[in-house]
Amino acid sequence: MSLFKFIFSKVFLKQLLIAVVVLGLLIFAFMQWLKVSTNHGEYVTVPDISKETINEVKTTLEKAHLNFVVLDSTNYNPDYPRYSVIEQHPEANQKVKEGRKIYLTLNPSGYRKVSVPNLIQVTRRNAASMLKAVGLELGEVEYVDNIGKDMVLSLKHDGQEIQPGDMFPKTTKIDLVCGNGNEEGTTMVYDSIAPAQDKE
């Protein structure tokens, strides 16, 4: 039998039809398995877990059939409870597949500590700018008898003298002791926001 006659014979056509049907069934079965294994078409809404603690997050996401991964903490935000969620990705109300990982950024326990800059023999105005630059705040300014007018002579915190390089949490108020420009006179204390401070 020639090849041409064999190709168009009933036996070959029957076997070809069977092969096509079997292949079709295999493809159909594979596609069904793929849909099930990837949760095709099954989406859930990401809940808003802002300000929730880890224990609360675990409960909330388990109910939504989602997982989570905690990223490094960010800068402290006083508007959020300590160790609570500040950011989440994907964001709330987005549609994702079940089992999706939600990436979380947590609020640390407090402001990170920074080093007090060396403000000795710096003018009060420059000292205020240097404190602000590192995240600290200017507290009270005390003036004492010293010929160096408005020059910083020493630093204090809560009434205790401190040194450049000491570590304090961000937003801590640092008090300055400055010269009043007089060799003799009366020691005066001004609030850090009083207009008298702005004199050079």
Image (cartoon, grey):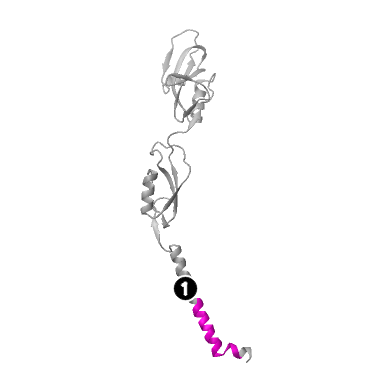
Tag 1, which secondary structure? helix
At label 1, counting other C-alpha atoms closer than 10 Å, the crowd grade (few under 14, some 14-19, many 20 or more) is few
Residue 140: % across, % down: 43, 21
Position above or below: 22 against 116: below
Quadrant housing the N terminus: bottom right
Query: Which residue extends farthest right?
Result: 2
Q: Nearer the viewer, residue 200 or 66?
A: 66
Residue type marked 1: Phe
Residue 47 visible to an observer of this rendering: no
User: Can residue 54 be seen?
Assistant: yes
Q: Residue at x 47, y 66 (%)?
A: 34
- Residue named by callout 1: 28
Q: Is residue 77 magenta?
A: no
Q: Residue furthest bottom?
A: 1
- Where residue 86 sits, quadrant-wise, is top left
Q: Is residue 118 left or right of residue 43?
A: right
Measuring from the top left, give residue 166's x and y in whole percent: 50, 25
Determine whether 80 is above or below 7 in the image.
above
State the predominant SS element of the stretch in magenta. Answer: helix
Residue at the spot 43% in from the left edge and 65% down from the top edge: 36
Point out residue 103 in the picture as x, y percentages from the top left corner.
Answer: 45, 49
**In the rendered view, would you say 196 is above or below 66?**
above
Q: Position of residue 105 (x, y in %)?
A: 45, 44
Q: Nearer the viewer, residue 96 or 66?
A: 66
Q: Is residue 132 above or below residue 42?
A: above
Report the front residue among 16 and 198.
Answer: 16
Residues rendered magenta in the picture: 5-23
Q: What residue sits 47% from the left and 73% below the top?
A: 28
Residue at image point 42% right, 16% down: 189
Q: Does the stretch in magenta take in 18?
A: yes
Q: How many marks?
A: 1
